[in-house]
Image (cartoon, grey):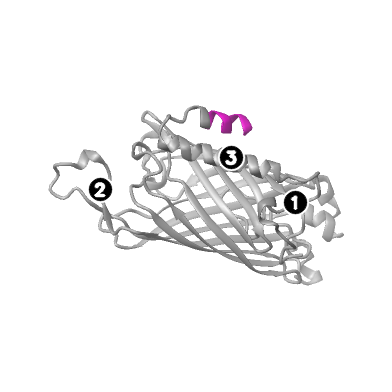
Amino acid sequence: MRVIDVHLYIVAPRTARSRRIKALVVALALVCQAAAPHQARAEDAGNRDFPATLVVDEPQVETEIAPQIARWTADRARRTDFSTDVSLKLAAPLSLVIKSDFTSLRPGSSGFQDAEVGLKYQFIANAEHEFIFSAGLSSILGRTGSAQVGADTFTTLVPTLYFGRGAGDLSDSLAWARPFAVTGQLGFEAPVQARSRPSPSTQGVDDPYQSNPYALSLEGSFQYSFAYAAANVPSIDWAKSLKGWIPLVEYEIEIPIANNGSRVPTTGTIDPGVLWVIGDVTLGLEALIPINHQSGRHPGVRLQLSYSFATPWPLAGGGPSVSD
């Protein structure tokens, strides 16, 4: 994944967007400088560790980098996305999140999607019930990407709720189910412009503008941690041979709910896969199964390598996490 990330910056054109990417590279470097000597991953809520998944953002606040590559067929074109998510833990319950995607369409064009920046605040970390709840606000910055790959010309604000819940408090009769956990997030996508001109090619058209719908973004995961079983459920002794593996199923659905004069359809995917966790490193592989023809004509695949750092971003001082 490091090689993929390097290629992402090599192909960037020498434009204003390239300066944005250079700023992202600086952010990545700062994250790397924040790395302390290797430590085991901290427990997020009691005995539960919510690892980085490929669709759902982690409910907890931490410093992490997660490059990813995804490939599928959409709109009669083979689409490949190279993305990088960076999370910087600024203080005990607060983190800064930066996201950037580069899209390649074959046949078609290549270019960056609009950049996204935001903040996440962790409100609850309950060790007894292995529960975490956070909220965040991000901005997808219009005109920072290429219209040739579908980037918007308008900015969208996205308030989001995040949660994670483990099943470790189940009774002894259901001990086999204690390794189960769910994570999820609910976002509301609110464009700052009700209508916009999608591209220069619409000049001269009677009504060159399109409606920008408000939408709900639903994402979630269902996972079973063999590492949790090996450490916390003695009756599942065979789980020790699979320690580090987490089979899971994720989903992502976007539902337009208002101002949908352009009749943008509901889209989404169901994503079965597996995680392999080794200390602070998580490797994930998933299939992408479209829920309808508007979401894609054929299944795809997604691969992610994430690294979680043990210390907060040094420029902010940091402090003990609310989950400690």
Q: Which residue is denoted by mark 3 in the rendering?
A: 26
Q: Is residue 59 above or below residue 126?
A: above
Give the residue at x 27% y 42%: 199
Identify which amino acid the numbered label 1 is placed on.
Ala
Query: How many callouts does the rendering have?
Result: 3
In terms of secondary structure, where does tag 3 sit? helix
For the residues bearing labels 3 and 1, Cβ distance under 8 angstroms: no
In terms of secondary structure, where does tag 2 sit? loop
Q: CA distance from mark 3 to mark 1?
A: 20 Å
The quadrant holding residue 164 is: bottom right
Quadrant holding the C terminus: bottom right
Q: Mark number for residue 197?
A: 2
Front: mark 3 or 1: 3
Front: mark 3 or 2: 3
Query: How many C-alpha atoms fall within 10 Å of the one at disc 2: few (<14), some, or many (≥20)?
Result: some
Give the residue at x 37% y 31%: 109
Q: Position of residue 230 (x, y in %)?
A: 83, 54
The quadrant holding residue 214 is: bottom left
Give the residue at x 59% y 47%: 86
Q: Is residue 81 left or right of residue 107?
A: right
Q: Which residue is denoted by mark 1 in the rendering?
A: 310
Query: What segment is highlighted magenta in the picture?
Result: 1-8
Q: Position of residue 42 (x, y in %)?
A: 77, 56
Give the residue at x 40% y 43%: 144
Identify which amino acid the numbered label 3 is placed on.
Val
Q: Check residue 4 for magenta coloring.
A: yes
Precedes in sequence: disc 3 or disc 2: 3
